[in-house]
Amino acid sequence: MASVLPRQVDVAIIGAGIIGMSTAWALAKAGVRVAVFEKGVIAGEQSSRNWGWIRTVGRDHKELPLAMRAIDLWKDIQSQHDVGYRQTGVAYLAESQSDMDGYRKWLDKAEPLGVPAQLLARDQLPDLFKSRSERNWIGALHCPVDGVAEPERATHAIAKLAIAAGAQVFEQTAVRCLDQSGGRTSGIVTERGRVAADAVVLAGGAWSRLFCGNTGVSFPQLKVHASVLRTTPVDAGLDLAINGKDFTCRKRADGGYSVSQLGASVADLTPDSIRLCRQFFPAWLSEKKYLKLRVGRRFLDELMMPTRFGAQGPTPFEAYRTLDPAPGMKSIGVALDKLKQAFPEFQSAQVAHAWAGFIDVTPDAIPVISGVESVPGFYLASGFSGHGFGIGPAAGALMADLVQGNTPLVDPHAFRLSKYERP
Ligand SMILES: Cc1cc2nc3c(=O)[nH]c(=O)nc-3n(C[C@H](O)[C@H](O)[C@H](O)COP(=O)(O)OP(=O)(O)OC[C@H]3O[C@@H](n4cnc5c(N)ncnc54)[C@H](O)[C@@H]3O)c2cc1C
């Protein structure tokens, strides 16, 4: 890891999650002088806490071109460092005809984009999982090229690749604010001093809205609390990642399984959720089956958090080095029980560890990967809404293209920040 801050780089990146590190890797490979500044540690927040799914299945169609391009990059990463990437396949199981109808609708739009997913009937399910299931699944949506990787390893491996290509990475180095002169971005101010840069990429995960707000840029983003558990090693005969509706599981490299459920997500009421309620209301309506609303301490914590700060004093980015919320044991315990009921081979599995993270969400659950028109030289790659691990390497490559003015990897139109501007 680098120690002495550079005085000047071509591109400064804020945040060493999978998005910041993938952007740095792509830029460094192109010979760009790039440095990443992280207030805590590499992958301390969402990027090491996720389920580890790399899927096309169930994704918003606008993200599918990125998801397909990400597969090649995951293969490339795995060929250089063992991040546990395997194309195990991902299956969304169906218990009702209406589940199957929903999957059919999704598939009709995904197939023309080259996604090799398929609908499987009940009698094809034994080919998917070796273990017997007690649940009456009537079929599944399955994509054989989808897979998994180990979140605890992946971003660190991408950081190694970026550093080997010439990038510099600074941990424990919060970026306080953007430096601007003559109406454009001229660098950043960190807690350890200024760094001049022609372009700045904000890949700040759940912190991006706060940083943007202080820069005078409106970014509609909220945080959703999500919990996961890891089981002790178990020989359950399930290699692919499965969404069983009231549980999800994927096999880990350590022999255990990461288990959760979509319903293990909690949206805390915060001052931002009130400010943004008009923009997020449609999303909340469509997700309310999976999302619990909670009123608690976070309202006061966020109310007390300064929203304007300058270069001189400490900022919230220094006060909160790593978001490490406590997991909701009840909901993930239910998920493990449901998994055990569905697949009795899991009966001996114990909870080895549980954790939580804050997922950063946007109103349409699509990330922003875009230049910020009102602040030339400032770019945003954030709001990955619970899907950023799988597409992370491709999202970083796309961001790098935009910064360099190259032909973009995929059409970036769906990811522009300006779509949230009010008419
Ligand atoms: C429980 C859970 C399960 C998930 N499951 C999946 C899954 O299976 N598949 C999938 O594709 N996605 C999944 N996701 C989503 C995925 O993890 C995220 O979309 C992705 O990791 C986002 O990466 P990021 O780099 O944008 O953010 P992060 O990993 O959160 O990184 C942002 C970094 O920026 C730093 N930072 C912020 N502000 C500053 C500042 N001012 N100065 C310096 N540093 C700063 C933060 O400290 C942080 O390290 C899941 C997420 C969670 C929480």
Image: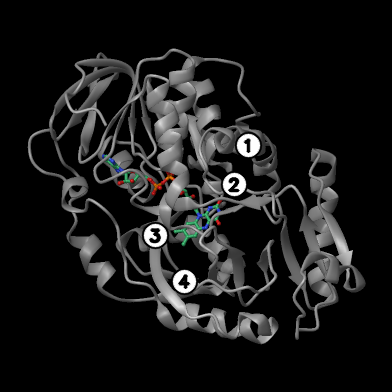
Q: Nearer the viewer, residue 5 or 409?
A: 5
Is residue 411 shown left or right of residue 323?
A: right
Residue 15 location (% of width, % of height): 34, 39
Q: Earlier in the sequence, mark 4 or mark 3?
A: 4
State the residue position of label 4: 229
Disc 1 crowd, CA 10 A, few/some/many (<14, 14-19, 20+): some
Identify the amino acid type marked 1.
Lys
Would you name the residue on which mark 2 appears?
85
Q: Secondary structure at mark 4?
A: strand
**Mark 2: which amino acid?**
Tyr
Q: Name which residue type carries label 4.
A: Leu
> In the image, which is nearer the foreground, mark 3 or mark 2?
2
**Cα gap from disc 4 to disc 3, whole angstroms:** 15 Å
The quadrant holding residue 94 is bottom right
Q: Which residue is mark 3?
A: 358
Q: Is mark 3 within 8 Å of ligand 1?
A: yes
Query: Which is more N-terminal, label 2 or label 1?
Result: 1
x 18%, y 23%: residue: 5
Instruction: Give the class, few, some or many, for how many residues have Cα within 10 Å of label 3's Cα (few <14, many ≥20).
Output: many
Q: Nearer the viewer, mark 3 or mark 1?
A: 1
* Front residue of this view, candidates 311 and 133: 133
Q: What element does badge 3 sit on?
A: strand
Question: Which image quadrant for residue 132?
Answer: bottom right
Which is nearer the eye, 276 or 68?
A: 68
CB contact under 8 Å: marks 1 and 2: yes
Q: Amino acid at mark 3?
A: Phe
Of mark 1 and mark 4, the one earlier in the sequence is 1
Q: Is residue 59 left or right of residue 183?
A: right
The residue labelled by disc 1 is 75
Per the model, the C-alpha gap separating discs 1 and 2 is: 7 Å
